[in-house]
Image (cartoon, helix red, strand yellow):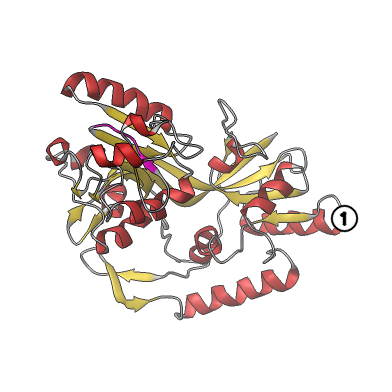
Amino acid sequence: MVTRLRVSALLAVLLLGLAACGGGGSEEAAESAPPAAEGETQAPATPEAGASEAAGGVTRADADLVIWADETRVEPMEELGARFEEEQGITVAVQELPFEDIRDQVQVAAPAGEGPDVFVGAHDWIGELQANGIIAPVDLAGREGDYQDVAIEAVTVEGQVYALPYAVENLALYRNTDLVPEAPATWEEVVEIANRLEAEGAVEQGLVVPQDAESSPYHNHPLFTGLGGYLFGRTPEGELNPDDVGIDSEAGLAAASQFAEWYSSGLLDTSVDGALMQELFGSGQAAFAISGPGRWCRTAAGSRRPGCRSPSSPPAHQRQPDAPVRRRPEHLRQPVLGERAARPDLRP
């Protein structure tokens, strides 16, 4: 059995809409478009279906409103799309892409006029997509109060909201309850147990945390801030302050020294990436893991386990005296609309 100890990092889900989307499939595109790429859903299967193909190889479905979503969100998007079709009298197609491919494919397809009108992505994509003119602002029509403040903040750039946050997830410290029956009360206890079990040969790695270049800043952030470090301070108005960089602050440097000690002792291993973390913890060869919930809901082959849930237990805290608790990085996913979407009249 696996349980988890919460670590202060959020994940929210966004639907993003394009600033440069396709026009619903022209006759010329219908004549030349090849069959849909593997892994897509509701995309036309033949050239006669009227699809158009983006430069990146993803075929845009022939519909008034096209949505790109990953495997875990296709089904709810299809249900919502069916209702929207009936209410608006339009056609809606939902296409499936691997989550990790959506951002790159959008940036290739949108300028060519062949991208989706709405897509699902992470909130930390917004800065790049907004700067490149890919996404358009979303008018929440006074409904901002229906959402968590931190979610709206995460999808706001230069005072404008660019996505609709619809879910929040947390990073967590997971423990294998067969190896660690009682939940540790402190981070120091986690470290002691992890080191002891590894020294005894009970596990290959006491604690697994992704340390590859792409994952480590996100997964290490709760540990860094728990030690009193921070990335950017805040202005009196609560905005991030680029003039207050905390990485080289006294607490930030002390946190860096602690990380160096963890690497030296082997508590953190730079060879661990997300796949190895899943393999070691999933096979019982690691006592603890820091990750979001999604990875444990997938099989080794990458398919989703139906009804997957992870039980939780009280959090383990690591803080220096009077150190601020900084709840970052929030990791949101949401929908955003585009400036040149095929159906700009359907924007909220």
Quadrant hosting residue 209: bottom right
- Judged left or right of residue 225, residue 105 is left
Q: Nearer the viewer, residue 57 or 227?
A: 57
Residue at 55% in and 73% down? 255
- Judged left or right of residue 305, residue 70 is left
Residue at 36% in and 71% down? 232
Residue located beneath label 1 in the image: 200
Q: Amino acid at mark 1?
A: Glu
Residue at 61% in and 39% down? 302
Q: Secondary structure at mark 1?
A: loop
Whether 54 is drawn above or below 94: the answer is below
| The stretch drawn in magenta includes residue 285 | no
Residue 135 seen in the figure: yes
Residue 14 seen in the figure: no
Principal SS element in the magenta part? loop
* The residue stretch that appears in magenta: 59-63
Q: Residue furthest top?
A: 86
Residue at 81% in and 56% down? 198
Q: Nearer the viewer, residue 59 or 220?
A: 59
Q: Residue furthest right?
A: 200
Query: Can you say which quadrant of the picture contains the C terminus?
Result: top left
| The stretch drawn in magenta includes residue 61 | yes
Whether 310 is drawn above or below 134: the answer is above
| x and y, in percent, of residue 66 in the image | 29, 36
- Judged left or right of residue 233, residue 179 is right
| x and y, in percent, of residue 288 in the image | 68, 49
Whether 27 is drawn above or below 209: the answer is above
